[in-house]
Image (tube, rainbow, N blue to C red):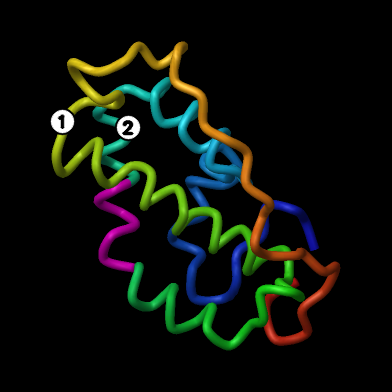
Amino acid sequence: MTNNALPRGFEDLAEFVPDWLHATEIERNRFRVAQPLAELKRFYNAMMPRLDGISSFLNDFPLHAMPRDCANLLELALMTMEVAPAVEYYNNPDVPESVEYEKFDILPVRQKYTVVESNPNTNE
């Protein structure tokens, strides 16, 4: 299995791997702000219709033993949550009329999932 794999049934999202995979909120925020709005909208439009299916699929995997391909899918979903306000509310990669991005500190939070090496139920 490669680190860029996605589970079966989610191959249509492969175009976003590995660029849109970020394990922390700090990384996701930094990536979002650096993207043109058109790219955020393209990602958002591809991901939003898939979120219910992604959530249902990931429910079968424990957070303490997440296979890498499933963790990739989770990270795409988390990135969608990061991108959604930029597309839905701000129409801007950053929050307009707010503190400059460079001055804004996101406190690090421990990752809530642990990646394991293999998953016999997916396409590894």
The residue lying at 54 percent from left, 62 percent from top is 74
Which contiguous range is marked in magenta? 44-50
The answer to whether 34 is drawn above or below residue 122 in the figure is: above
Which disc number belongs to residue 91?
1
Query: Is residue 122 one of those drawn in magenta?
Result: no
Q: Which secondary structure lies at badge 2? A: helix
Residue at image location 33% in from the left, 76% down from the top: 52
Name the residue tied to disc 2.
39
Q: CA distance from mark 2 to mark 1?
A: 12 Å
Between circles 2 and 1, the one closer to the viewer is 1
Q: Quadrant of the C terminus?
A: bottom right
Q: Nearer the viewer, residue 49 or 77?
A: 77
**16 lies above or below 48:** above
Residue 90 percent location from the top left of the image = 16, 32
Which of the image's four quarters has the N terminus?
A: bottom right
Secondary structure under the numbered disc 1 in the rendered image: loop
Q: Main secondary structure of the magenta part?
A: helix
Label 1 packing within 10 angstroms: few (<14), some (14-19), many (20+): some
Out of 15 and 116, give the one closest to the viewer: 116
